[in-house]
Image (cartoon, coloured by chain):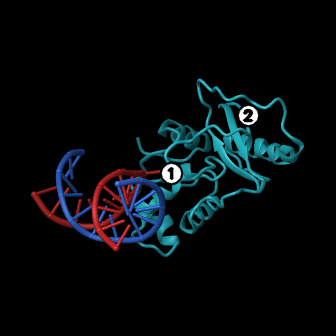
Chain colours: A cyan, B red, C blue
Amino acid sequence: MKERQAAPNAFPISTSEGVFHAHYSSRGLCALDFPQPQSRRRAAGRVPEQFRNWHERTTQALNNVLRGKRPGDLPPLDLTAGSPFQRRVWEQLLGIAPGETRSYGEIAEALGKRGASRAVGGACGANPVPVLVPCHRVLAANKKIGGFSGGKHWKRRLLELEGAGVAA
DNA sequence: TCCAATATTATGC
DNA sequence: GCATAATATTGGA
């Protein structure tokens, strides 16, 4: 994937951190975008009946996470776009509690791929649903930020909200 | 099929 | 601390 294009079905979610945008497919939530300063998306007037229930759950879960709490009820996630390896990684991420962090190497080892720390980083970067799939709770071995698709300041901000220890 | 790029990590200087 | 090699996965030539 090279660039993220604005999909026609991007629905806004207002939070204390800004306005996120959720994308839905017929199977569920397929992508979530961070607030964009010059967002030029044309927000649909209202959420179609088909996605309304999911959108409500997404909104609630997102706000919960931003308050440092468990997401609670999650909408179905459409992660069919990812490779098997990536989906395994994301599944591991879902098991990380708020305020806790793990290293890329630990994720790799949990999957039985000892030296795949780098590949895990790649999988995290390919994660279409940040925050809900807590890719931000994965740090480097020395507890440093590492990188983040939506900008590492977001990663730091999210960890700060959860009270996780991060190295300067 | 091969090559280069990664949100890493361990080792050596 | 900084430079370098090793490692797994992915996407493109």
Viewer-nearest residue: B4 or B2: B2
Residue linked to disc 2: A12
Instruction: Tell me the residue at 47%/71% (across/down).
Output: A109
Q: Kindly state the secondary structure of the residue where label 2 is placed.
A: strand
User: The C terminus of chain A lies in which quarter of the figure?
Assistant: top left
Between the residue at mark 1 and the residue at mark 2, the CA separation in whole angstroms equals 22 Å
Residue linked to disc 1: A125
Measuring from the top left, give residue B3's x and y in whole percent: 28, 61
Among numbered discs 1 and 2, the one appearing first in the sequence: 2
Q: Is residue C8 left or right of residue A9?
A: left
Q: Chain of mark 2?
A: A
Most distant residue in the top direction: A38
Q: What mark, if any, has residue A150 been given in the picture?
A: none
Q: Kindly state the secondary structure of the residue where label 1 is placed.
A: helix
Measuring from the top left, give residue B5's x and y in whole percent: 35, 51
Instruction: Tell me the residue at 86%/40% (across/down).
Output: A48
